Image: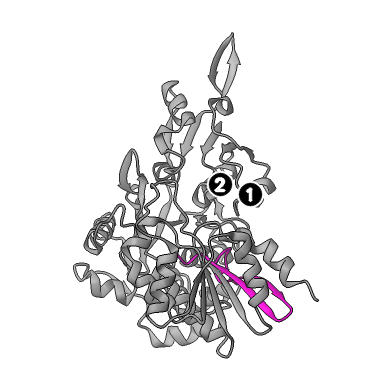
Amino acid sequence: MRVHFTGIKGVGMTALALAYQDAGWEVQGSDTKDFQITDEPLKARGIKVFEKFTPRNIWKLKKMVWVPAVDKLIYTGAHHGAQNVEVKWAASRGVPVMNYAQALGEFFSAKKQICVCGVGGKTTVSAMIATILYETGQDPSWIVGTSAISSLPASGHFGKGDWAVIESDEYTADPGADKTPKFMYMNPKIIVCTNIRHDHPDIYPTEQDTIQAYIKFFGKLPKNGILLVSSQVKNIVGASPDAKVYDNDPKLQELVKGIIQVPGEYNVKNAMAAVSVAESIDIPRKKALEALTKYTGSKRRFELIADINGVKVYDDYAHHPHEIESLLSAGRQKFPDKKIKFVFQPHTFSRTKALFDQFADSLKGVDEVILDPIFASAREAVDTEISSEMLAKRINETGGKAVFIANRQKLVKYLIKTSKPGEVIFTVGAGNLYEIHSELKQGLGKTD
């Protein structure tokens, strides 16, 4: 059986493609030529990626007629979603077609699903839970939204065990054709919710709209299901009396602080969530903590990129004001006496516009912010009423220090010229800012 992934380079799509391959499917996909962090794992697994969207990727000639060469097509909500030329052609020829969220729910329908949701922390908590299950011999399945995890062989896996750890997103399955929140296609046995914040304003106009989506998802739990939430979520969603708060145990907090290999108070809470899940499925706390020592991080989460001539460069996926605040706090904790610079690429016009003041507040505490132009998601049009230049101005007006540099080459040159030994640079955002790393490392490595 052959499955084709239209938009395979997305982190969730790649993870699912790897899991399909584990389950014995022949896997192929298509995407743009643009470099993505998932290029390496796809190549390492020998998965063919066509760098263009065309029906030619999924057809074959049989008796002088072009017929489907795949048994199933899974597509991302990006790249025009259901209107992508591959998706339309496959559907018109009777090939089973599903968006990513639908396919994810179906693929793991026979597993006991541990669904991790929340605006921030989903990837790390999912990776930590999967690590504990993996290290304790559960042979779990998992789907984690990144390209590499230090303690696991891949970002996606289909195991023989009962449990599947699934990073579960509240964003719509396909903006153009299916407004269903992605996590509504899951059938959870356990839900972990890290926090609830207003995000994706293109889908959820208000914070209350976001909250209602989560409450509806919580309602999918069976009577014997388990809901684990942070104290922040419990305060917001008082309507869930059965929810267990995972971050109010001082003893567990101290134990976690003594063993985790990743910085920041938010990672202490992430680890507490993972241990709480383990205990809820009868994995002893001692074994869970021991397993967690293997976890040293995930791609694009406080990831060390370089340490050159006294300048450290880290990369992080933070793209919401709350996540930026948490990242800065962790940076201060790890480097209390060093100057910290954030190179920030805002992600989507709608988010930047709706949370403009919150972004300015979260960034004004950074020693210096260098702003890259807004990364325009494929799912939205350019909005000329908002810009990174405007955000830089607001940060400066409120007591911070920020500069906007529209040209990538000039931005890299600025960093190379102004960075001094002892400083720490974070590239921050969910877009493609990581593309500057190679040039930045080369420039910092030069000596006069």
Is 323 on the left or on the right of 16, as rendered?
Answer: left
- Closest to the observer: 360 or 9? 360
Is 158 on the left or on the right of 276, as rendered?
Answer: right
Quadrant assignment, res 235: bottom left
User: Between marks 2 and 1, how big is the CA–CA gap?
Assistant: 7 Å
Task: From this view, report whether residue 100 is shown above or below residue 211.
Answer: above
Residue 298 falls within the magenta-colored stretch: yes
* Residue under pointer 2: 9
Inspect this view and state whether residue 13 appears: yes
Q: Under tag 1, what secondary structure?
A: helix
- Closest to the observer: 3 or 365? 365
- Closest to the observer: 394 or 128? 394
The percent coordinates of residue 430 (x first, y second) are 49, 60
Quadrant assignment, res 341: bottom right
**Mark 2–mark 1 CB contact (< 8 Å):** yes
Q: Under tag 2, what secondary structure?
A: loop
Q: Which mark is residue 39?
A: 1
The percent coordinates of residue 301 (x first, y second) are 54, 68
